[in-house]
């Protein structure tokens, strides 16, 4: 089990690096909006990867996720060509909600402190 965890971490790290490079090269319009790949979650059987993305505060992440989602097959194909893996996992793109949640919590705490 421990070895499987290390393997999925290695796969996630390699894919994150390759994906960031691919987005920088082939999607300059997303790079200008400071799209960031915050983390990847690789399925234990390596059949898919959930890619969580965020962007600079004030930018709407949903259109960026839509672009990447529409191109997921093509992106997967390009990454697979660079990878030693025999079967490359499917990519699923999601907005990273952690930053939004932490911002809301900070706002609530700040407002609570002002109201006391």
Image: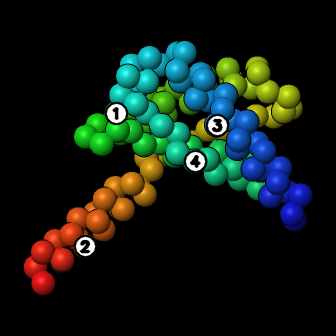
- Classify residue 1 as left or right of residue 27: right
For image coordinates 29% across by 65% down, the residue present is 106
Q: How many marks?
A: 4
Q: Position of residue 28 (x, y in %)?
A: 44, 17
Q: Which residue is mark 3?
A: 16
Nearest to N terminus: mark 4 or mark 2: 4
Q: Are marks 4 and 1 in contact (CB under 8 Å)?
A: no
Displayed quadrant of residue 61: top left
Image mark for residue 92: none
Marks 3/1: CA–CA distance: 20 Å
Q: Which residue is mark 1?
A: 63
For image coordinates 34% across by 33% down, the residue present is 63
Instruction: Choose mark 3 or mark 2, whichever is in front.
Output: 2
Instruction: Choose mark 4 or mark 1, whichever is in front.
Output: 4
Q: Residues within 10 Å of mark 2 (few under 14, many from 20)?
A: few
Judge by depth and name the residue closer to the eye, 93 or 108. Answer: 108
Nearest to N terminus: mark 4 or mark 1: 4
- Classify residue 56 as left or right of residue 80: left
Nearest to N terminus: mark 3 or mark 2: 3
For image coordinates 82% across by 54% down, the residue present is 6
SS of the residue under disc 1:
helix
Quarter of the figure that contains the C terminus: bottom left
Q: Position of residue 75 (x, y in %)?
A: 60, 25
Q: Which residue is mark 4?
A: 39
Nearest to N terminus: mark 2 or mark 1: 1
Nearest to N terminus: mark 3 or mark 4: 3
Marks 3/4: CA–CA distance: 8 Å
Q: Are marks 3 and 4 in contact (CB under 8 Å)?
A: yes
Image mark for residue 109: 2
Q: Residues within 10 Å of mark 3 (few under 14, many from 20)?
A: some
């Amino acid at each position: 089990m421990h070895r499987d965890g290390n393997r999925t971490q290695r796969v996630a790290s390699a894919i994150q690096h390759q994906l960031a490079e691919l987005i920088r090269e082939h999607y300059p319009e997303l790079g200008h909006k400071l799209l960031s790949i915050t983390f990847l979650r690789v399925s234990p059987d390596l059949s898919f990867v959930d890619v969580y993305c965020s962007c600079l505060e004030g930018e709407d992440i949903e259109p960026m996720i839509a672009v990447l989602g529409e191109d997921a097959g093509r992106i997967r194909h390009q990454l697979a060509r660079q990878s030693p893996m025999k079967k490359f996992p499917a990519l699923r793109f999601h907005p990273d909600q952690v930053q939004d949640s932490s911002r809301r919590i900070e706002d609530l705490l700040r407002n609570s402190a002002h109201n006391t």
